Image (tube, rainbow, N blue to C red):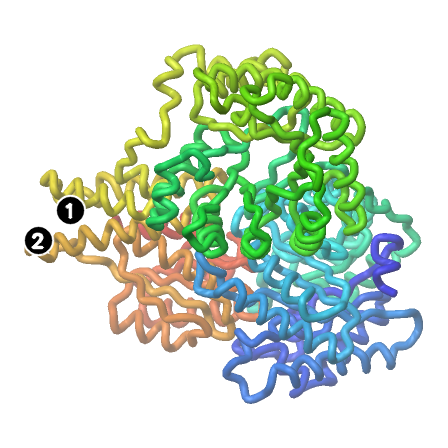
Amino acid sequence: MLKDRIGKELLFFDGGMGTLLQEKGLKPGELPELWNIERPEAICQIHRDYLEAGSDLILANTFGANRCKFHSQNVSLEEVIQTALENARRAVRQVGGKKRYIGMDLGPTGRLLKPLGDLEFEEACQVFGEAAKLGEKAGADFIHIETMSDTYEVKAAVLGAKEHTQLPIFVTVVFDERGKMLTGGTVEAVTALLEGLRVDAIGMNCGLGPEQMIGLVKEFRKYCSLPLIVKPNAGLPKQKSGRVYYDVEPDVFAERMEEIIDLGASAVGGCCGTTPEHIQRMIALCEKKAILLPEEKTITVVSSYSQAVEFSDVPLIIGERINPTGKKRLKEALRSHDLEYILREGIVQEEKGAHILDVNTGLPDINEKEVMTEVIKELQSVTSIPLQIDTVDIPTMERAMRFYNGKPMINSVNGKKESMDAVFPLIQKYGGVVVALTLDENGIPDTAEGRADIAGKIICEAGKYGILPKDIVVDVLAMTVSSDPESAKTTLKALRLVRERFGVRTILGVSNISFGLPNRPQLNAVFYTMALQQGLSAGIINPSSDAMMQSYDSYRALMNQDENFETYICRYGQQDSDVIRHSAENVSVNLKNAIEKGLKQEAAQATKALLSRGEDALSVIHTYLIPALDEVGKGFESGTVFLPQLLMSAETAKIAFEILKEAMQKNGSSQEEREKIILATVKGDIHDIGKNIVKVLLENYGFEVLDLGKDVSPDRIVETALKENIRLVGLSALMTTTVASMEETIRLLRKNKPDCRVMVGGAVLNQEYADLIGADFYGKDAMQSVYYAKELLKK
């Protein structure tokens, strides 16, 4: 079986499909998957060529075979997938020889998931699940999810495949040259997510050539416990005499792949631009090589969509403020659906130093499941740090885990059988780091030894579900000293015992220790320091508390965890801590800050307040809106702000702009004439993620966007440009097979409207390629396109 071989021996994938189909006559606009039916021999021949080159694993021609792309075709999705698998099987029979495996290839839908786009998460799960099920029915040996640029879509694809098939699941994602996915995910973050979802092998494909992937292979090897797949492009796309080609020749490709195997890859192949010759040379050079076997990493890590937080000897802060216990204002916000208050609490805690946010929405008179899910989705749109799902309600826990974008912390499980029976299957399915409370059917032991015994029982039971100790963080429970004077001593001893016996990380709700006593911050801070000395890995605390943060900062400084005392000096050397640390209740969020943080209600209120003060609407746009968007754009360019935050800021600015627009219409003041820009995904390409992102940002900078959609013919683009007297056209392409349409569009614009400039973007493009096809500007990301439009059109 393939599961018994992957990661234990070197296996070879096939290479590119689209570029070879182009050579065989695939025209711009044609769906490659239709060739399974219309030209099956051409598909079989490509499969045979790769098999004869030595490939162990070949992918059926099903990359775009999903209902999002085939909803308007005259052929059923089932027929397309069934024929694709038949073509691959026929090729395997014709070549014969060693055992081969055929993968059901699943590419992205071409749409962004909500809240960034319009595709519902559950719908995405169904889209992928339907295609995977048809692939299994047609005889696929494994599911191969590839070319993914968004962790949320990755999760939907994996869940869809797991819930509809019994096949092994391999996943490869796309990174840019900075080592980030489109939505900001890093190697460590995507590894945490996919290992939690229990896929069978992970890695990367497309986007980069083998040389550019070498550093990322090292990152995977550092964090990943699973077999590693690496499938680079044959370098970067270029053009000569009207034809697309890639700049890494087969021999050079083989040499680089040998180095990648030496670094830890155990399943290798090629993506765009690679040919049977590339694969043949790679196999000839590498087939006798031994591989580095996957090594089980013991890192305890949680993740969001963009970043991973690792438990280490440096303690973590888990922000406690989004928990209604003892918080009247938060209870009101949960009951009245005041999400802005909750989001502001999250933002403030992150700014104050929280590494993870605890999220608890448990009130008796609300629908906890619905509110928890909504709060998690909204929080993940304004903050990039991981969340701790804090609930005792199992249906709420499952729904939150399903919709969470990353690998969350789960608070909690305890030593009662019913608790472990309910929680562990969810950790097994969705992944997560679970908080283990040291209590069971007999209550909370009075002794440290008793609590450590329960921790051991939970760890042992978790192992039956394949949950390793690295994914368990033990809470030995801080009970108030006012009712048990020995409680603090017992808790501190239990912290040490658990760490020594089991080697797991620990967590405490620190403020529980002081209930019922005066001057609680003083007691909490001292107890927190004592717990840190006993090896506490993470404290659930209020990061806006001066006393707690002073304890934390002082501990790190004294334990040589604050290099050159940078944090300590920064916080306490020049400024008074009372000025630095202010509570969420007292934070004044002006319009610029509201836009930067993505707080829609705050932005609306601030806009109305500025207008009521007599501010001119146009002045508000130029003084507040545009500078705020510029600031977020700079953060996006530098890698400190990620795509979800960028788009949320843009949506927030849009709300403010609509209020200003309405005010201008009421008082009869003239609005600035808005320059029109055409955006279109070129003929034959049905991916519009990049185009839609650029559209949102351009509109917020005051441009009127004529969005012609996707799969747009050159003639229609030129016709619209002439009719509307357009000075700038933006063209997008994701697939190598459609760049010819982009070049044709540019040629026609040059001929018919020479004063019109053209900016281009998309995963298959680079500056050299853009120059070769005659574009005026290459937008490496959405913000660069906006800056070019502003400069060109003097906005």
Mark 1 closeness class: few <14, some 14–19, many ≥20 residues within 10 Å = many
Residue 283 visible in this rendered orientation of the protein: no
Q: Are marks 2 and 1 in contact (CB under 8 Å)?
A: yes
Q: Helix, strand or loop at disc 2?
A: loop
Given the current orientation, which residue lies at the most extreme left position? 668
Residue at the image point whose x is 69% and y is 58% from the top: 171
Residue 303 visible in this rendered orientation of the protein: yes
- Find residue 205 and report its horizontal and vertical position in percent: 67, 56
Viewer-proximal residue among 426 and 92: 426
Q: Helix, strand or loop at disc 1?
A: helix
Measure the alpha-carbon separation of dots 2 and 1. Answer: 9 Å
Residue bearing mark 2: 669
145 to 433, vertically: above or below: below
Q: The residue under label 2 is which amino acid type?
A: Ser
Residue bearing mark 1: 617
- Find residue 325 and report its horizontal and vertical position in percent: 46, 36
- Find residue 554 and report its horizontal and vertical position in percent: 54, 14
The quadrant of the image that shows the N terminus is: bottom right
Viewer-proximal residue among 254 and 753: 254
Residue at the image point whose x is 50% and y is 55% from the top: 369
Mark 2 closeness class: few <14, some 14–19, many ≥20 residues within 10 Å = few
Looking at marks 2 and 1 on the same chain, the residue that comes earlier in the sequence is marked by: 1
